[in-house]
Amino acid sequence: MMGFQWPWEASASITPSLSMLSVGMHLGWALTLGAGAVFLLRTAKVTNVTSRRIVALLIVLLCLLPNEWSPSWWLGLAFQTPSLTLQGLCGLYLFQHLRTQHGTTAPLSGSTTAPLQARWPLGLLLVAIIAGWVLALDTFAVFDIALYAIGFTPYAVLAALFFACLLQLISARSAHAQNTRHYRELASIVLIATAIHVLFRLPTGNLWDALLDPWLWIMAHGLAIYVVLSKTRSHKSEATN
């Protein structure tokens, strides 16, 4: 009599099935491109909520089309699938900026001009930057241990769970309400991303790919520079006054 099997134990492969890979790729690029479109519309000061919703919906539907009819198919050939963390952040961004209150936008960031992600704590951005550089250097065998290969093992899952718990503890001790919310949001996203990866092996079978990808890494660099420059300008104006 066969015992109980978890979804990832049904196959000897540690990589996702072709069907799950296709679904994950289309959903991933739908969320990423939809959030990118809303960000560009906000940057262009398009304040009409209906216009944002229509554009985001059209892009999401376009990404869900099958095979070569979808931009997800072509982007997947070149860049594979966005990390589950990036998908979670993009989904959160869409939710926060497309919900309405009395017919107008109700952004959680206060300002409608500055991007919400630019208000994330600099420490979190630095963690993403350092982790990306470590994995990048690992591809050149700089370290004695193959760090990327650990992403296929249960040790990576334990590390991700520890990181999520650490974020939750930091959020409880943070005195800044905005930072507290961001720590909690990222902790939840990391937990959900880890659970999806464990169940379905998305996006590549390696947990590091589920938590961090080159696009998220590049975004972290840009946002960290933005935060540093903003703080520098703020200190200069305070000194001038």
Image (tube, rainbow, N blue to C red):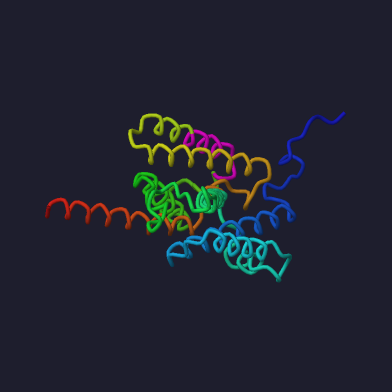
Q: Nearer the viewer, residue 77 or 102?
A: 102
Which residue corresponds to the image point at 71% horizontal and 65% vertical from the top-left? 65
Which residue corresponds to the image point at 44% horizontal and 35% vertical from the top-left? 167
Say left or right for 78 vs 136. right
Tell which residue pokes out farthest to the front in this image.
102
Say left or right for 24 vs 159. right
Which residue corresponds to the image point at 42% horizontal and 55% vertical from the top-left? 137
Where are the magenta residues, as a range? 151-164
Residue 70: horizontal and vertical position, in percent? 68, 68
Say left or right for 12 vs 237. right
Question: Is 196 included in the stretch rendered in magenta?
Answer: no
Q: Is residue 199 above or below residue 170?
A: below
Q: Is residue 205 above or below residue 44?
A: above
Say left or right for 198 vs 133. right
Q: Nearer the viewer, residue 184 or 148?
A: 184
Residue 96: horizontal and vertical position, in percent? 51, 49
Tell which residue pokes out farthest to the right in this image.
1
Q: Quadrant of residue 42?
A: bottom left
Residue 186: horizontal and vertical position, in percent? 48, 42
Which residue corresponds to the image point at 59% horizontal and 48% vertical from the top-left? 206
Q: Quadrant of residue 226?
A: bottom left
Q: Main secondary structure of the magenta part?
A: helix
The quarter of the rendered structure image containing the N terminus is: top right
The total number of labels drawn is: 0
Residue 155: horizontal and vertical position, in percent? 54, 37
